[in-house]
Image (cartoon, rainbow, N blue to C red):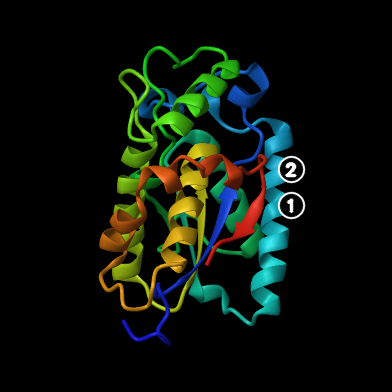
Amino acid sequence: MDPSSPILRNSYWVLRHGRSIPNEKGLVVSSLENGTLEKYGLASEGFNQARLAGELFLKEVEETNVLPENVQICYSPFSRTTDTAKTVANVLGIPFEGSQCKALIEFRERYFGPLFELHSHEKYSEIWALDEKDPFMPPEGGESVADVASRIALGLAAIETEFQGFTVLVVSHGDTLQILQTVLNAVKELEPSKEGDIVSRIKQVAVPCILSKHRKFALETGELRQVI
């Protein structure tokens, strides 16, 4: 790879969904079946957070002279992320049902398994302790950090194949976005001579000493952050 060439064809921002009903109830809602239910969408505070994040993102793209038609919103199909993405699209003046907004299942919530699903979110600490010891070891019946990194890579590859020169906003979940930031920051550190597409480059950095530290990229609900 030419040292002067960018790692990716697009620039990326991430946004964790606004405060949700599961957040307020203190519940782990991580399966696709439960997460897409309307009753697990955003709480009223979450809609406010999403609107504020949309306004901040709009200011950022305007200051960098990004044209509205060069913004792409990619979001998890869960209710809380769909609500967030729709709110941001409204702020930006982008039709949510149009081609600039796309649900990507690769960016869904990390599935924590049946022992955690619909139980107290206080149990997250157990999962993160396991992640630190071995990010390739999933909670029983759930996804490991490495599993999530693999599907994130496929989602990024799909975006990179379809778009070039876009500003992409990924609207997703806490763990998913922590892992996304972890691998992209590690990819940025690869030597320019390390060639390959984004999937192969993420495979190169998906090692225990990197993946086990994903918590350092934690986001609050409704938090917007530029990644690359």
Residue at numbered disc 2: 48
Front-lying residue, 30 or 43: 30
Q: State the SS at label 2.
A: helix
Amino acid on which disc 2 is placed: Asn
Q: Which mark is residue 52?
A: 1
Q: State the SS at label 1.
A: helix
Q: Is residue 155 shown to the viewer in this render?
A: yes
Query: Residue at point 33% right, 28% down?
Result: 137
Give the side of residue 20 with respect to residue 95, left or right.
right
Front-lying residue, 33 or 15: 15
Q: Which mark is residue 178?
A: none
In three-dimensional space, the C-alpha distance between marks 1 and 2, rounded to whole angstroms, equals: 6 Å
> Is residue 191 depicted above or below 28 in this figure?
below
> Is residue 89 depicted above or below 195 in this figure?
above
Contact (Cβ within 8 Å) of mark 1 with mark 2: yes
Front-lying residue, 198 or 45: 198
Q: Is residue 86 shown to the viewer in this render?
A: no
Give the side of residue 128 with respect to residue 114, left or right.
right
> Is residue 79 depicted above or below 87 in this figure?
above
Amino acid on which disc 1 is placed: Leu
Q: Where residue 209 sits in the image (x, y, percent)?
A: 43, 45
Query: Residue at point 66% right, 63% down?
Result: 57
Q: Residues within 10 Å of mark 1 (few under 14, many from 20)?
A: some
Give the side of residue 156 with respect to residue 184, left or right.
left
Q: Residues within 10 Å of mark 2 (few under 14, many from 20)?
A: some
Q: Where residue 226 sits in the image (x, y, percent)?
A: 60, 62
Q: Quadrant of the N terminus?
A: bottom left
User: For residue 21, which quarter of the picture?
Assistant: top right
